[in-house]
Image (cartoon, helix red, strand yellow):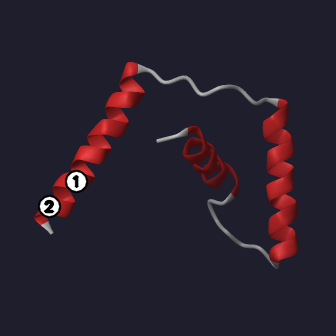
Amino acid sequence: MNQIEQWFSILQRKRFTIPNFKDKVVLAERLQAFIQEWNIYAHPFHWTTKSVAKVMAKCEANLAAAKAA
């Protein structure tokens, strides 16, 4: 998982849990508002042994499921 995937995951959890946008203009405004807020408190993502193990376990589970299908 790279950093942009992590960022989009945060975006989805914080702003798009219930996607209810009147139109594309409202969607664009909410995206811009999130980006401005994010940039105020932006920080680098820190990978730990635990986070890497979690990602690898998910990849292995997906691979096993694909082989079983």
Give the residue at mark 1. Answer: 63
Quadrant where the C terminus lies? bottom left
Quarter location, residue 22: bottom right
Name the residue located 36 percent from the left edge and 38 percent from the top edge: 55
Name the residue located 44 percent from the left edge and 21 percent from the top edge: 48
> How far is mark 2 from mark 1, CA to CA?
6 Å
Quarter location, residue 17: bottom right
Give the residue at mark 2. Answer: 67
Dot 1, crowdedness within 10 Å: few (<14), some or many (≥20)? few
Q: Which mark is residue 35?
A: none
Q: Position of residue 19 (x, y in %)?
A: 67, 69
Q: Which three-letter amino acid code belongs to the residue tagged 1?
A: Leu
Relative to 51, is 29 on the left or the right?
right
Relative to 33, is 52 on the left or the right?
left
Q: Position of residue 34 (x, y in %)?
A: 80, 49
Q: Which three-letter amino acid code belongs to the residue tagged 2?
A: Lys
